[in-house]
Image (cartoon, rainbow, N blue to C red):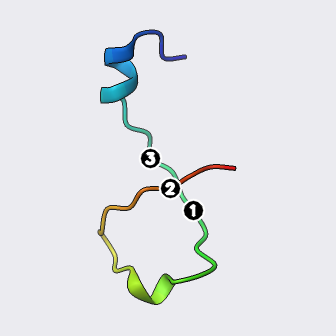
Amino acid sequence: NVQTKEERTTTVYAVKIRITEGKEQLKAGMPADVTLQ
């Protein structure tokens, strides 16, 4: 549970995602933004 605004902007979580479209445009190690639904 992240309590403060500063913690929310500096905390990083490692996640695994499955890409269903456009995966040929991404390379290993590239940063990406992800929206969770």
State the residue position of label 3. Answer: 14
Taking the view exactly as shown, the residue that stands out farthest to the bottom is 24
- How many numbered tags mark residues here? 3
For the point 57% across and 62% down, the residue is 17
How crowded pointer 1 is (Cα within 10 Å; few <14, some 14-19, many 20+) is rated as few
Expressed as whole percent of the image width and height from the top left, the position of residue 22 reads 51, 83
- Place residue 19 in its image quadrant: bottom right
Q: Earlier in the sequence, mark 3 or mark 2?
A: 3
Q: Nearer the viewer, residue 36 or 1?
A: 36
| Mark 2 → mark 1, Cα distance in angstroms | 9 Å
For the point 34% across and 80% down, the residue is 27
**SS class of the residue under badge 1?**
loop
User: Residues at badges 2 and 1 in contact (C-beta under 8 Å)?
Assistant: yes
- Place residue 7 in its image quadrant: top left
Expressed as whole percent of the image width and height from the top left, the position of residue 35 reads 56, 52
Indicate whether 32 appears above or below 26: above
State the residue position of label 1. Answer: 17
| Mark 3 → mark 2, Cα distance in angstroms | 12 Å
Instruction: From the viewer's perspective, tell me whether residue 27 is left or right of residue 36.
Output: left
Instruction: From the viewer's perspective, tell me whether residue 32 is left or right of residue 16.
Output: left
Q: Amino acid at mark 3?
A: Ala
Indicate whether 9 appears above or below 4: below
